[in-house]
Image (cartoon, helix red, strand yellow):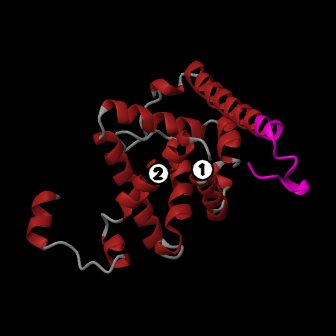
Amino acid sequence: MRNLPSSEAGAGPETVDATRRTLLQTGLFGSLLLGAAGATATLSGCTGRTEATAAGYKFLRDADLPFLRALLPGVLGSLLPAAGMERDRLLDDLLHRIDLSGYRLGLPSQKALAQLFDLLNMRLTRRLMAGIGPWEESTPAQVQAFLERWRGSSFAVLNTGYRALIKLVAGSFYGTPAGWAAANYPGPPPGPYQVFNS
C-alpha cells in the first residue's frame, strides 16, 4: 500500500463516505421531485388525457401545441426556413406528423409520451424540470439549453425524455421534402411514394 502525499490525505474513507452520501441525497431529491411531479399530474387529471384533442388532431391537445411549437425551432434551428409562410406551413406539417406518430403508437408508449408532454406543460413541473416559463415566450436558445441539461443529466428518466423528444422531431422532419433536402436525399421514387402515402 503506497503512502499518500499530504495533499491526498483528505481522500480517505471519510471523503468517500461523504461523496456517497451526497450522491444518495441527490438521487433521493431527484426521485422525490419526479414522484411529486407525477403525483401532481395524476391528481390534476393530466395523466388520463381527459382533455379533448385539439381541432384537426388525433392525439395532441391544445396544451401540447405551444410546447411543440417552441420545441421544433429549438431542435431544428437553421434547418427551418426563415420566418414566413413557408416556415409556418412546415411547422404545421410537422405538428400533424408528430400528432400522427403519437396516434399510431401502442397504448403504453402513447401513455408515456402523454405523461412527458403533461410534465412539460404544467407550470410547476415545467419550471422545475425544464427551467422555462411559458412556452410561447421561450426562445430556441432556452429550449436548446433545457434539452442539453436533460441530455447530460445523471437521471436516466431525463435522458430518456430527451431522446424521445429528439427522435419525435427528427423522425417527423426527415420525412418531409425539406428534411430530404437538408440530408441531400433526392427523395423516394415517385410511384412507390404515392402508393404508400395516398
Please give the name of the residue rendered at 53% of the width and 64% of the height, measured from the top-left corner: 73
- Residue 48 vs 14, above or below: the answer is above
Q: Position of residue 143 (x, y in %)?
A: 62, 57
Chain-order first, disc 2 or disc 1: 1
Q: Residue at x 66, y 36 (%)?
A: 125
Q: Secondary structure at mark 2?
A: helix
The furthest residue to the front: 1
**Residue, disc 1:** 150
Say few, some or many: other residues with alpha carbon within 10 Å of mark 1 (under 14 / 14 to 19 / 20 or more): many
Q: Alpha carbon of mark 2 to alpha carbon of mark 1: how far?
A: 9 Å
Position of 5 relative to 17 (above/below): below
Q: Residue 148's image quarter?
A: bottom right
Q: Residue at x 27, y 78 (%)?
A: 185
The region drawn magenta spans: 1-18
Please state the horizontal and vertical placement of residue 191, each as a whole percent of the image.
8, 69
For this view, does 75 lie left or right of residue 136? left
What type is the residue that disc 2 sits on? Answer: Arg
Label 1 sits on a secondary structure element that is: helix
- Residue placed most toward the observer, 166 or 91: 166
> Which residue is denoted by mark 2 in the rendering?
163
For the question of whether residue 198 can be seen, the reply is no
**In this orientation, does residue 9 appear?**
yes
